[in-house]
Amino acid sequence: MLYIFDKDGTIIASYGNRPANTIEEQHLLPGVGEKCAELRAQGHHLAVASNQGGVAFGFITNDQARALVAHAARLIGTKDYAYCPHHPKGTDPIHGIACGCRKPQPGMILQLILRNGIAASDTIVVGDRDTDRQAAEAAGAHFIHADKFFERS
């Protein structure tokens, strides 16, 4: 089974209305580390898929976004991740575009499914937003809301 986790608000704590924008700010939400360790011990594959639209608005660089998502993946015990630096309303001429990888589009989910060689029907996307659910469904994967998955009240 492949478990694909959204980053901000699902495995990593947010800061009010904004995501963690530095590695030092990234902290796992309660119960995430233990649950991911349990999944790895059971032989499941883990990955992270994250929209990083801050790149398109100039808040962070593409390299910073990549580092943030890679670090979040390491925090849950995997090296497998995908991220999208695009946003259709972004001001950056390179990243301010609509694309097929930004959730709710399925691009990142499909990329991780293909990379792992695991069927979409054997993939669970865990997220906290409707866009995560829509991306999972568009990719043919299952979806579980983060609050339910991590038994948050």
Image (spheres, rainbow, N blue to C red):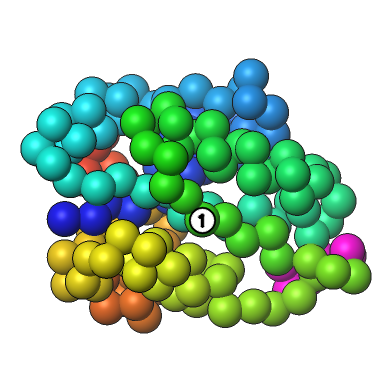
Residue 41 shown left or right of residue 26 in the figure? left
Quarter of the image with the N terminus in it: bottom left
Residue 86 pos. (x, y %)? 70, 65
Regarding residue 150, the answer to whether it shows in the image is yes
Residue 72 pos. (x, y %)? 49, 34
Above-or-below relation of 112 to 47: below
66 falls in the magenta region: no
Above-or-below relation of 32 to 111: above
Q: Nearer the viewer, residue 14 or 35?
A: 35
Q: Which residue is mark 1?
A: 82
Identify the residue shown where x is 34% and y is 53%. Answer: 4
Residue 52 shown left or right of residue 55 in the figure? left
Q: Circle 1 sits in a helix, a strand or a loop, which is it?
A: strand
Q: Amino acid at mark 1?
A: Ala
**Neighbours of disc 1 within 10 Å: few (<14), some (14-19), many (20+):** many
89 falls in the magenta region: yes
User: Among all residues in the image, which is located at the extreme top?
Assistant: 24
User: Among all residues in the image, which is located at the extreme left?
Assistant: 42
Above-or-below relation of 46 to 112: above
Regarding residue 104, the answer to whether it shows in the image is no
Q: To which quarter of the image does residue 57 belong?
A: bottom right
Identify the residue shown where x is 68% and y is 45%. Answer: 65
Q: Which residues are magenta?
A: 87-92
Residue 36 pos. (x, y %)? 25, 33
Q: Main secondary structure of the magenta part?
A: loop
Q: Nearer the viewer, residue 129 or 39?
A: 39
